Image (cartoon, grey):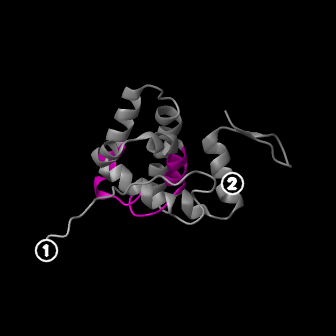
Amino acid sequence: VPVLQTNNGPGLTGLMTIAAHLVKQAKKDQLLGSTAEEKAVVQQWLEYRVTRVDGGSSKEDTRIILKDLNIHLEDKVYLAGNIFTLADILMYYGLHHVMVDLTVQEKEKYLNVSRWFNHIQHYPGVRQHLSNVIFIKNRLYTNAH
């Protein structure tokens, strides 16, 4: 469990608590959602990250997570709909080790997750030290003349 020691007061414990605190410190409150509904959806995905993604360890857990996300992202740009939030950032970091290991075929099977993940990894300031995950399959074309 992560702990953030602050200068004033006791340390903060837990991924969601620390992340929300840092968002407020940076005056980037929009990352937590603008409306009550967006805030609830962001919280929901942050909890999903902690309970399911961080808690899942088997190949079957990973498959279910990718399947759930793929369905959710079918008609959305971001996890909370059409706005980039903390949920996208933390889910990206939680899934990076999974996405790195997927084959091209697996990435194509979870096309919505792959589209979302590729978009998030190219969002300014998100990827940081993590490796770039490749999603393009090289094709050889013959000249049909």
Q: Position of residue 128 (x, y in %)?
A: 62, 56
133 or 76: nearer the viewer: 133
| SS for dot 2 | helix
The residue type indicated by label 2 comes to Leu
Left or right of residue 34, residue 106 in this image: left
User: Residue 46: which numbered mark, if any?
Assistant: none
Range of magenta residues = 69-93
Vertical arrangement, residue 88 with respect to residue 123, above or below: above
Q: State the image quarter where residue 62 is shown.
A: top left
The stretch drawn in magenta includes residue 88: yes
Front-lying residue, 50 or 110: 110
Residue 97 image point, x, y percent:
51, 41
Element under disc 1: loop
Q: Residue most toward the right?
A: 7
Position of residue 19 measured from the top left corner of the image (x, y, whole percent): 64, 49
Q: Which residue lies under the disc numbered 1?
A: 145
Residue 113 horizontal side relative to residue 120, left or right = left
84 to 117, vertically: above or below: below
* Quarter occupied by the C terminus: bottom left
Is 56 colored magenta in this rendering? no
Q: In the image, which is nearer the foreground, mark 2 or mark 1?
A: 1
Q: Residue at x 78, y 40 (%)?
A: 11
- According to the image, label 2 marks what residue? 22
Give the amino acid type for the residue marked by disc 1 in the picture.
Answer: His
Residue ID at (62%, 64%): 28
Q: Residue 115: percent from the left, percent from the top? A: 36, 57
